Image (cartoon, coloured by chain):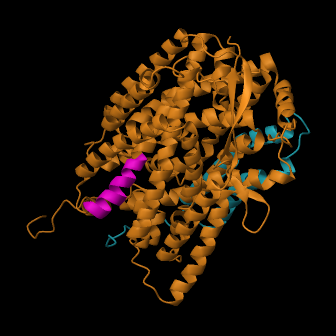
Chain colours: A cyan, B orange
Amino acid sequence: MSAPAVPSSQRKRLPTRAAVVAGLLLLIPVIALGIVPVYSRETPKLWGFPFFYWYAILWTLLAPVFTYSAYLVIARARRQP
Amino acid sequence: MRGLAVGGGVHSTELAVVLGFFALVTIGGFVAARWRRGQSMHSLDEWGLGGRSFGSVITWFLLGGDLYTAYTFVAVPAAMYATGAVTGWFAVPYTIVAYPIIFIFMPRMWSVCHKHGYVTPADFVRGRYDSRGLALAVAITGIIATMPYIALQLVGIQAVLDTMGIGGTGSWFARDLPLIVAFAVLAAYTYTSGLRAPALIAFVKDTLVYIVIVVAIIYVGVKFGYGEIFTAAKTKMTKPTPAGPPTGVFITSKANYWAFGTLAFGSALALFMYPHAMTGVLAARGRNVIRRNAAFLPAYSLMLAFLALLGFAAIYNKTPVFGRDGYANAQLAVPHLFDQVFPSWFAGVALAAIAVGALVPAAIMSIAAANLFTRNIYREFFAPNAAPKQEATVSKVVSLVVKFGALIFVLSLDRQNAINFQLLGGVWILQTLVAIVAGLYTRWLHRWALLLGWATAMIYGTVTAYRQTVPNVKVKLVNGTPTPQVHGTRHFGTSVADFPFTHTKVYIAISALVINLVVVVVVTLILRALRTPAGVDATSPEDYYADAPSDAVLSTVEREMSGAEPHSPGAT
């Protein structure tokens, strides 16, 4: 396909700083659930839930916080000229 | 409340509630054709991607309805019930880490596909690498991985029907008719409404599922107690079997850290390689819709976690899992638990949630598989000049063929076959990751190396999965006593196997992916040294950041993609 003329208003690469910050924010939940030996334990229990189980449930709530923060970092960087 | 004995009549209250919801979603499915309608349904963009117009809320319901399937609702707690943490609970970390991963690369995928009018991942591979062979490999992998997944949605419906007292023994016609009717209706509205049908039905499905889960969470907490269900599960999982060590896992240990971790990460990487997931993403209106959804979709994972724990609740409650055919089937654990503990009208709502939960993904999967066939096989090899309308027609017909193929698969073969193939499907689909995801960032990898890596990994993965033999034990209820019957051994026993040259159990898809990568890199180095032609890249770097194409570009793309306008001097 021949490349059509691209308008100059097209989006550009994300600034490096914002990309690094967003990347780190996204990395946190991945690492938190990647360290299987660390969270493979029964105690401390919470409301009868062994640690292994409540830890994963906790991350279903924490992961969105980090992911949404990454979204905000990127959205803000895009708005700045 | 049902005892251990099988049988009893049809549960009419439950059946009435389920039929009521089925009627509601059927109307919704047909009405969807008019919902948010574009100028015409006669193109793949409209029929197969809902006009690429879905905002954050619709996408959240659509992807939630698409990814958390009826089979998931049945199989994850079933695995928790049967063997515990490794095969069951891995689904929770899996559906958490999937989203940071897609946050990174899916907006790029969306941009390049939007810019060039790509409908399928294989379209992108075709454009990026200029290789029909590689695109065909990606398309066929997508189709064969999706087919058994559709079949498993039927298995989910079967579990619901069996619980309500339909199925089991009797003539095949009486047994299977409800399933055939349900699928025929589904096929009809998918045909007329395309992706808009499951998008609309997803609202019903997800609402039902959330209501049921919230009630179940409270019920289990108040009536059983979470401490109690974990104690019951621990007792079951850690009890040695007559043959040797326990088969269950309550909390992962040194022996299965890698199995658990690679199952979670491998499945997370594979999730958005599935054509139906890709279809849901490409139907979004913009890049930010995808990023916001990556942040908010884990709400479904929270729900999945509590659903998984219902498998433990079934252990605590000593829920019988014998089907109408008299055999034990762990997949009946949650439907039977609902049937046991809820009043029948609410059990009906819960069972309807599972049944409707099967329809949404089955529709999207058949659309995705049909789009792959139309774009990357039909148009690529048989009708290069197919007009958009012709493409939409072919896709509609293929979506019917795909659904009936799945139906025949489930009705004619043992349920175990569908499960085996779905296991294989996960191994297969992950092998398309190298071409697709690496392709979003770099064109360094050579197209023929990618093809060779894919082929090697497909063979390795299939053979390895086949070689995992386990004793084929079925438990039958004989005069009220569960009686194990051993029928030799069966293949595809587990999804983990020793990583090559080690004794560490690892998800087969991950081992295959490592082999895939090694082959791709080594062969790329060789082909580059030999200066083998790498083909022409149809995309340019800024395509991967583009938000929405300008009108000029759009019309150029439409003209080129449609191939309908002859380049005659008279045409303007």
State the residue lying farthest toward the right: A43
Percent position of residue B216, x then y: 69, 22
Which residue does the image show at 69% across and 22% down from the upper left?
A: B477
Q: For residue B382: magenta?
A: yes
Q: Residue at x 47, y 71 (%)?
A: B541
Q: Quadrant of the N terminus of chain B?
A: top right
Overall secondary structure of the magenta section:
helix
Is residue B423 found left or right of B89 in the rendered image? left
Q: Is residue B445 left or right of residue B513?
A: left
Q: Residue at x 23, y 49 (%)?
A: B389
Above or below, A56 relative to B210: below
Q: Is residue A57 visible?
A: yes
Q: Please state which of residues B361 and B477 is positioned toward the viewer in this rendering.
A: B477
- Of the pair B532 and B52, the residue shown nearer to us: B532
Residue B29 found in image quarter: top left
- Left or right: residue B563 versus residue B466 is left
Q: Examine the image and state in which quarter residue B483 appears.
A: top right
Residue B174 pos. (x, y %)? 43, 20
Residue B552 is at least partly visible in this image: no
For residue B461: magenta?
no
Q: Which percent across, then down, holds residue B91?
A: 68, 43
Q: Which residues lie in the magenta part?
A: B368-383
The location of residue B7, given as percent across then percent down, is 60, 14
Could you tell me how many numbered marks the image carries?
0
Q: Which quadrant is the C terminus of chain B positioned in?
A: bottom left
